[in-house]
């Protein structure tokens, strides 16, 4: 059976500073050959809520080609 979901994306996470679930913004930290590292931050207060490693190195490939 083929995978139905390749990657999960967070839309909301619990923010300890706000005391409730809040929408998140996904910000890229690093473009790596093995995938990109992202942080999730609260869209309301900017608190760091989590992170993710995307295993598809799309951004790294684009950076290499620009040189």
Image (cartoon, rainbow, N blue to C red):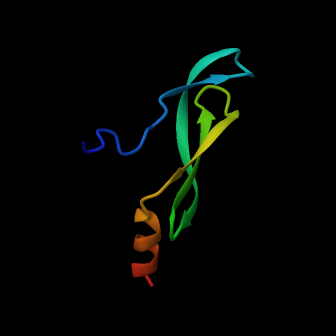
Q: Is residue 25 above or below residue 56?
A: above
Question: Total marks drawn?
Answer: 0
Q: Residue at x 40, y 64 (%)?
A: 58
Quadrant in which the C terminus is drawn: bottom left
Quadrant in which the N terminus is drawn: top left
Q: Which of these two is toward me, 11 or 25?
A: 11
Q: Position of residue 59 (x, y in %)?
A: 44, 64
- In the shown orientation, is residue 58 left or right of residue 28? left
Q: Position of residue 48 (x, y in %)?
A: 69, 37
Q: Residue at x 29, y 39 (%)?
A: 4
Q: Position of residue 56 (x, y in %)?
A: 42, 59
- In the shown orientation, is residue 3 left or right of residue 59? left
Q: Residue at x 40, y 71 (%)?
A: 62
Residue furthest to the right: 17
Q: Is residue 66 above or below residue 34?
A: below
Q: Position of residue 63 (x, y in %)?
A: 46, 74
Q: Residue at x 41, y 44 (%)?
A: 7
Residue 50 falls in image quadrant: top right
Residue 18 falls in image quadrant: top right
Residue furthest to the front: 1
Q: Is residue 15 above or below residue 29?
A: above
């Amino acid at each position: 059976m083929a995978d139905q979901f390749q990657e999960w994306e967070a839309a909301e996470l619990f923010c300890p500073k706000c005391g409730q679930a809040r929408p998140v913004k996904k910000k890229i930290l690093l473009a790596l050959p093995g995938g990109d590292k992202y942080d999730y931050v609260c869209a309301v207060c900017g608190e760091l809520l989590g992170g993710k490693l995307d295993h598809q190195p799309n951004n790294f490939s684009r950076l290499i080609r620009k040189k």
